Amino acid sequence: MSLLSVIRRWHFREGMSQREVARRTGLSRNTVRRYLKDTSIEPVYPKRKTLSKLDEFEELLTAWFKREARRPRKQRKTVKNLYQDLAPLGYTGSYDRVASFARKWREEEKLAASKKMYMPLEFAPGEAFQFDWGENWAYINGLKTKLQVAHFKLSNSRAFLIRAYHSQSHEMLFDAHNHAFRVFKGVPERGIYDNMKTAVDAVKKGKERVVNRRFLAMVSHYLFEADFCNPAAGWEKGQVEKNLRDVRSIIWHRAPRVHSLTELNDWLETQCLLDWQTRKHPQYSGTTVEQAWFKERSHLMKVTALFDGFVEQSKRVSSTCLVNFDRNKYSVPASHANRRVSLHAYPDKIVLLAEGQQVTEHQRIFNPKHEPPCVIYNWQHYLLVAQRKPGSLRNGAPFHLLPDSFKQLQSILLQRKGGDKEMVEVLSLVLHHDEKQVERAVEMALDAGTPSKQHVINCLSRLLNPAPVEPAPVSKGLRLITEPTSDTSRYDELRGKHHAQ
C-alpha cells in the first residue's frame, strides 16, 4: 500500500515519467502503468482459499444444522454427535474443524435473524389474552419436582397469572383457564395460542386448523375465539413469551418449599396479584398493571359457570377391583368387578362412574417415571369380597389401611373361632352408618375390655339413639279437682268373701 502511494505521488504530483518510476522502484513498466490506471486506491487481493477435508461435506453439514434447529431443544443432536455421524461417510478430519464450521454457521444465522422485521402490536381493552406453557422446578414435600407452568396474560392491561401442574394434558389446561378467568374477573373476546397438541389436532395451510373437540367445547363454554399463531412465529404472542422469561427472575427464584402443589399455586397467585400493584404499564405512563386491569375489567365478559374440565376414559375393572390410569391403579367397589366404568380425570382427583352414577372418588396421585406405580385402595370397596371370603381378611392388602381401633379389634377377634366372620360383620356396619360413628363404637367396646360384635352393635346403638338427659316434660294444663284415694280393700272385695277371710 505504501509503494502504491509513492508511485502515484511521483507520477501525478512530481511529473515523473513511468520509465523513471519503473527504474527507481524496480518494477516493470506494465506493472507501473496498471497501478496508475487503476482508479481504486486500495488494491484488491484474491480471496485466499485453503483446502480442507471438510469442503466436500459442507452442504451436508449445513442441511444437518438446519434440520436440528427445527427440532425441539431437548431432542437436538450436539456437534459432537454430528461429527460422529460424518465419520462413517468418509470424513477423516478433526472435530475442531466441524466445531469451527458450526460456530460460523450459527453466527451467520444470528446475523440473518437480526435483519428480520416485525410489526408492533396493539390491543384494545378486553380484546385478547395470550397463553403459553413453560417449565420450572420447585421443591414439593421435600422433593425437587419438574412442573409445567401455565402462563396467561391480558394483552391490553398486561395483567398475568401463572399456575403450576404436573403435565400439559387436557384437564390441566382446562383447570388453568378456570382459574385465570376467575382471577381476571371475566373472559376476553379472543385467545391467542401456539399450535399445542391439546388444542390443535392438525395444522393445515395458512390459518386453517383442525381443532381438538374437547378444547373446542371449552372455547364454546366461555364464548371466546381461539386464534392460533403461524408455526415458528412466537412474536405473534410476544407478550406471554416475554412473561415466561421474566417470571423466572421475578417470582420463581423466591418460591418456597411447600408440602403440596395446591399450596404452591396459592402462593403463586398471591405473588402475581402483588406484582400487579407495583409493576408499571409499559404503554400507559404513570399507570400500574393493576390500574390498567381495573379499566379493562369492564370490557370482559363475566363468568357465570366454570367449565367442567375433565378427561373421560372408558376403563375395565379387573377381577381385583382395580382400574389403571396414568401408571397408577385405583380401587372400585367390588360390585363393579369385571365390568366397564367411566373414568373422569381432573387435575386433583379421579372420579369413577357406572351407568351415569358416581361410584367412587380418589385423590389423584402423580409419581415420577423412575418410581414404581402406586396402588390406591379404599378398604370399603372390598367388603363384598370379605363377606363371601372372610379368610381373606387376614392378608388382604386393602385391609392394611384399617384405622388403628379396627386393627386392634381384629387382632382380638381373630384369636376366637369364627372371629374373621365376626370382624367382617363389624366392618360391614360402615355400609349403613357413618364410619366415624362405627369407629367410636369400636373404641368404646375396646375400653370396656370385652369387645365383641354384639358389644360394638350395642355401643353403636347408644351413639345413634342416646338416652334423654332429662325426663319428658309433663303437661300441667289439666288438674283433678278430687284426687283419688288409695284404698286397697276394693281389690279384696273382688276376690270374694272366702278369700277375704
Image: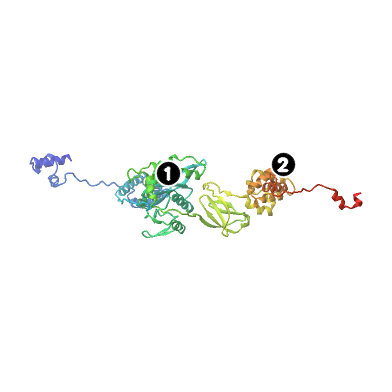
Camera-side residue: 341 or 361? Answer: 361
Residue 441 shown left or right of residue 300 in the figure: right
Q: Report x, y in % for residue 162.
A: 43, 46
Q: Which mark is residue 273?
A: 1
Which of the marked residues, 2 or 1, is nearer the chain's N terminus? 1
Q: How is the image coloured?
A: rainbow
Q: Which mark is residue 416?
A: none
Label 1 amino acid? Leu
Q: Which residue is mark 2?
A: 448
Residue 375 in view (yes/no): yes
Please, what secondary structure does the residue beneath circle 1 have?
A: helix
Residue 474 shown left or right of residue 281 in the figure: right
**Disc 2: CA contacts within 10 A as few (<14), some (14-19) or many (>=20):** few
Q: Report x, y in % for residue 314.
A: 54, 58
Residue 273 shown left or right of residue 461 in the figure: left
Inter-mark Cα distance, 2 to 1? 57 Å
Label 2 amino acid? Ala
Circles 2 and 1, Cβ within 8 Å, touching? The answer is no
**Disc 1: CA contacts within 10 A as few (<14), some (14-19) or many (>=20):** some
Please, what secondary structure does the residue beneath circle 2 have?
A: helix
Which residue is painted at 52% across and 53% down in the image?
345
Q: Report x, y in % for residue 246.
A: 39, 43
Camera-side residue: 69 or 255? Answer: 255
Camera-side residue: 156 or 468? Answer: 468
Q: Report x, y in % for residue 107.
A: 32, 46
